Amino acid sequence: MLLKDYANIADPPQYPDDLFSSAFVICQFQARYLIGFNNWRLQWEIPAGKREPKDAPTEPVLQTAIRELHEETHQTAQDLILCGVASIFDETKMETRNRAVFTGKILRPTPFIFHKGDEMDKIQFVPSQDLNTINIDPVDLAIVRQFEKHVNF
């Protein structure tokens, strides 16, 4: 996967849900980013995931962000806001998909307790500069760096 492009979103209502295939959730607590260690891919990641079809139509992208954040990190963010769109190129499928980028704050972290089947086996909150020193997904890091250029978080 490669980050092809990132665009800041100033007016979220102009971006329809069907533009997005997935959601990416950038959250902070005390000026530190929330990341989780993906025990399937053996790397640190920002919470993210694909939209799931419910009955019909597909779930709203905001619901995807809320669900993925909770499923992967067991956290709940305050006031998730759509702030960007990341165009991701999938080299395996030779296709480009748009990922909604949400931002929010964790007011009070909840303890992370690993459950069998969890994708993440631990979480942590890290300062921006430390993201460069850990084994983090390169596309996730690229999205965060683009986000930082556009948003005063």
Image (cartoon, grey):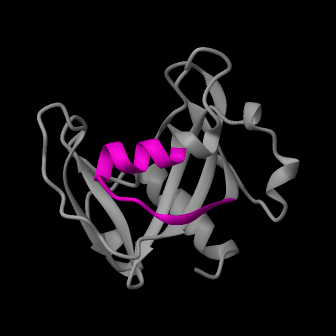
Tell which residue pokes out farthest to the front in this image. Answer: 55
Residue 115 percent coordinates (x, y): 13, 40
Tell which residue pokes out farthest to the right in this image. Answer: 14
Does residue 106 belong to the magenta stretch?
A: no
Visible in this render: residue 48?
A: no
7 left or right, relative to 132: right
Residue lying at 33% horizontally and 75% vertically, measured from the top left:
108
Residue 129 percent coordinates (x, y): 38, 80
Does residue 75 belong to the magenta stretch?
A: yes
Residue lying at 66% horizontally and 75% vertically, measured from the top left:
151
Q: Is residue 103 above or below residue 49?
A: below
Nearer to us in this view, 33 or 95: 33
Residue lying at 63% horizontally and 40% vertically, measured from the top left:
61
The image quadrant where one finds the C terminus is bottom right
Give the quarter of the image for residue 54: top right
Q: Is residue 137 above or below residue 95?
A: below
126 left or right, relative to 95: left
Q: Which residues are magenta?
A: 65-82
40 left or right, relative to 13: left
Residue 79 percent coordinates (x, y): 58, 65
Residue lying at 53% horizontally and 67% vertically, measured from the top left:
104
Give the quarter of the image for residue 133: bottom left
Q: Is residue 60 above or below residue 122?
A: above
